[in-house]
Image (tube, rainbow, N blue to C red):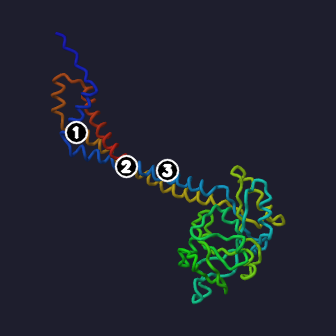
Amino acid sequence: MKLPEPARLKPPDVVALGAHGMRTRPVRAVLSALGIAIGVAAMVAVLAIPASGAQALHDRLAALGTNLLTAGPGQTLFGKNAVLPDDAVPMAKRVGPVRAAAGTGTTSASVRRSDKIAPDDTSGLAVYAARPDLLAVLGGKVRAGAFLAAGNQDYPVTVLGSQAAARLGIDHIDPARPPQVLIGTQWFTVVGILAPMPLAPEVERSVLVGWDVAKRLLEFDGHPSTVYVRTEESSVDAVRSVLAATLNPQAPNEVQVRRPSDALAAQKLTDTTYSALFLGLGGVALLVGGVGVANTMVISVLERRREIGLRRALGATKRQIRGQFLAESVLLSGLGGLAGGLAG
């Protein structure tokens, strides 16, 4: 007598059998899926945070511009501080791919909120001489008031960087009664407060005054201490290679040229190292969840040997038994992965 061929289980039947195994042991199923969910959530979060950070950095650099170069004096052959020529800024503008250039000059004056404060208490702020074209070259914005203009270059007015304003306790400007700060021995009227400028942190911590008034009242020697250059995007490296010789043809080795956006990129690279560590921790969590599911399925097989024997006696094949437990494990992993993905 020939035995009948065992019936083939359709995919919906296999899924139903797997779901039945989960329903009969809900607590174990929930705990197993939770292990997977935690691992997947950790993986998603760890991957998403560096990705969002990289995109934020990209957007930030796109807004600020990666085509900004800065040049300043270095050291002479005898170890003394070098000095840039007076015409360094006009010389930089002669380079073909250069769109715009501006400079700042360091003064020896200190800035105070009141004459009751000791002259040596500078709060870490510097006083720089600047011209009206500086803000456009840096791509900065004025948070309150206005920037230096051609009409007030000879008058004692000043513009505060964002950090300088915070340290001096000035957060707004009243046009009727603008605040004043003591620079050296001269009172200057604050006409503007700048927004943060990540590519020029030295400007954030500075107080800007007109170039001519700095010469007249603050004993400024007229030599720029920093030259800011905006170039064509495709010519940044070419301009960087000739900028030192252009600013100081007599001693190009005494000029230091850098690209501020490189510092932001290096900072992001440091953050990526920590992201890799978190990614490894997320992988370990996911591995633990996977081992938990495997352990659950092994125990489930051992506990359900009677059920397996009964089904075998009724004609179920080994393949169908394997399909049942495989479907159960896939459902556990799928539900845990879905929950973890949503949580992440």
Quadrant the N terminus occupies: top left
Tell me if mark 1 has few (under 14), some (14-19) or many (20+) residues whose alpha carbon lies within 10 angstroms of its own: some
Earlier along the polypeptide chain: callout 3 or callout 2?
2
Earlier along the polypeptide chain: callout 1 or callout 2?
1
Q: Looking at this view, is 8 or 214 the one in front?
A: 214
Left/right of residue 85 with respect to residue 267 in the rendered view: right
Q: Residue at x 63, y 73 (%)?
A: 159
Q: Which residue is mark 2?
A: 41
Q: For the residue labelled by badge 2, is the local secondary structure a helix, a strand or a loop? A: helix
Residue type of the residue flagged with mark 2: Ala
Q: Which residue is mark 3?
A: 51
Left/right of residue 89 with respect to residue 304 in the rendered view: right
Q: Residue at x 19, y 14 (%)?
A: 3
Earlier along the polypeptide chain: callout 1 or callout 3?
1
Furthest toward the top, the residue is: 1
Residue type of the residue flagged with mark 1: Met
Tell me if mark 2 has few (under 14), some (14-19) or many (20+) residues whose alpha carbon lies within 10 angstroms of its own: many
Task: State the mark number for residue 22.
Answer: 1
Residue type of the residue flagged with mark 3: Ala
Left/right of residue 340 with respect to residue 279 in the rendered view: left
Where 108 sits versus 344, above or below?
A: below
Question: Where does residue 51 sit, x and y in percent of width and height?
Answer: 49, 50
